[in-house]
Image (cartoon, coloured by chain):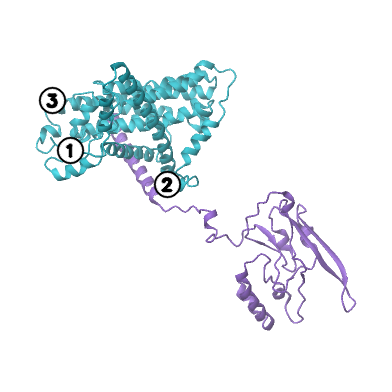
Amino acid sequence: MILNYSQPLELDGVSKALDTSLSALPDFWRILIECVLVGVVILTTYAVIALILIYAERKITAFFQARYGPNRVGKWGLLQSVADTIKILLKEIIRINNVDRFLFFAAPFFMVCASVMTFGAIAFGKGLLAVDFNIGVLYVTAVSSLGIIGVLLAGWSSNNKYSMIGAMRSGAQFVSYELSAGFALMTIVVLTGTMQFSEMIEKQQYCWNIFNGHISSMIAFVIYIISGHAETNRGPFDLPEAESELTAGYHTEYSGIQFGFYYLAEYLNMFIIAGIATTVFLGGYMPIQVHGWEGFNQVMNYIPSYVWFFSKTGVLIFLSLWVRWSFPRLRIDQLLALEWKYLLPINLVNIVVMVILVLTGLTLTDLFPSLF
Amino acid sequence: MDSVSKYFSGLFTGIGSLLKGMSVTWKELWTPKVTRQYPENRETLVVSDRFRAELVMPHDANNEHACTACGICQMNCPNGTIVVTSQIIETEDGKKKKILDTHQWDLGMCTFCNLCVITCPSDAIKFDNNFENAVFTRSKLIQKLNAEGSKLREKKKEEKPTAEAKPVIEVKAPVADAKPVVEKEVIAKVKPEEPKAEKE
């Protein structure tokens, strides 16, 4: 099989070697050690990706606004986000009178935990998947919606009208757009017939899902991207924060590392949305492969799978930033009208269309089995 | 039926306008950035001649300035930034004459209104572009504008007062500037009209 190539840079060999070296230990200890290692790796990646994203966002934003962006700390400002991290860690956590103290301190953890849990389910590359559930898509949709609890708790416990308004807006927005995102993913589940991420990715070897289901997939992709932006409170949908009206929305009262958690989770949610869109629509870590072009396939295979994943995700993150700095912020009624009057009906019709495409054999893999 | 067509036309015009907006920002992404990188670009920095950064009293190569110590600048200063002190000396032919002792200017109080420069009858002071004036103590902001041992430039009999009074060389001007200006002065002695034209 073509997949049995030698990839010197691939990381699944490392994880396999680790597993075999630990096989002498009793099961309990082996699993414990592996869990701890995976946890450490995921948390580190989480933090490092956040640092990179913050730098990339500031730089790209600056270029969209005809500025240079951070360019003083280190070469081209590369150390800017490290400096910011040190600053945010050193800042005082202010204890505010009259807040519901337990909920106030618990809220950032909800946000960051939901984000890390979703992050852990992403397939970063061949063998770089912490848990491979057979219901991966369902897990991701379920877990990512826990983050809203953090936002609502923060708004409620802050005892501040702006935080409250921001949290309520965020709740309305999140509940609405969760629906669209879920339906968009469901369209692809109909197409691939599986909810398991690894299986979904293997099936996209020659034809990405976005092309396989042509019209229907494209619509689902666009809807997923839009609702993904809305779920992460970014882009033109950042009205829960709405700094001009609500100071900072639900995290007005937070400072120091607690604010840092919200900041981190916001950036990572952007990455997670892009990562899931990559996995579900753009073939995940699969390199570009064409039936019959063995030489081309071989060359593409030499690029490690995580490079493919991160570059596809990077393109989607760039798209997210591009959208963010192109459009003005929506009003709450416009936001809800967009979801309930446009995205949701289109989505429902789209699923039906996808079912018809799959049942009547009109997907590209069915139409041109020799090509894809 | 009308509402249905309205729904779909609204949807597609909406998508069209969003794409148009994104094309505009896409072009903006690639426009060359014009931000000046200040501390690095000191050599190539262009500051407008009209920018008022620091009050100076131009001195020529003979360490002579044009200030007659009349005190009009001091009188015109709205917040007492300038203090002109003068002394009366006796010249060789027995006349009493007022000469400049110190011309003191306080950068910390100056509002850069330019009234002193406008009202100076002999164009002895002007604002120049040296804007890096930050210091650590307030006392350093008070500057003495006339150079040590400088004296008033003597009037040439035939010359028109305006041509002669024109500032020729600055106190803090870079050394490279000194030469051409001296040449100009030589020309000025022969033909008083010429340097004025050159200046413009």
Q: CA distance from mark 3 to mark 2?
A: 47 Å
A181 vs A202, left or right, is right
Name the outermost residue toward the bottom: B190
Q: Amino acid at mark 1?
A: Tyr
Residue visible at 13% across and 40% down in the picture: A291
Q: Chain of mark 1?
A: A
Name the disc covering residue A5, or none. 1
Residue B1 visible to an observer of this rendering: no
Instruction: Establish if B87 lies above or below A228.
Output: below
- Disc 3 target residue: A359
In the rendered image, residue A319, in percent from the top left (x then y), is placed at 34, 39
A52 vs B193, left or right, is left
Nearer to us of marks 3 and 2 is 2
- Disc 2 target residue: A63
In the rendered image, residue B36, in percent from the top left (x then y), is placed at 50, 54
Q: Of helix, strand and loop, which one carries label 3?
A: helix
For marks 2 and 1, the one nearer the N-term is 1
Q: Chain of mark 3?
A: A
Q: Amino acid at mark 3?
A: Leu
Nearer to us of marks 1 and 3 is 1
Task: Give the crowd class for mark 2: few <14, some 14-19, many >=20 residues within 10 Å.
Answer: many
Residue B63 visible to an observer of this rendering: yes
Instruction: Establish if A336 lies above or below B28.
Output: above
Q: Amino acid at mark 2?
A: Phe
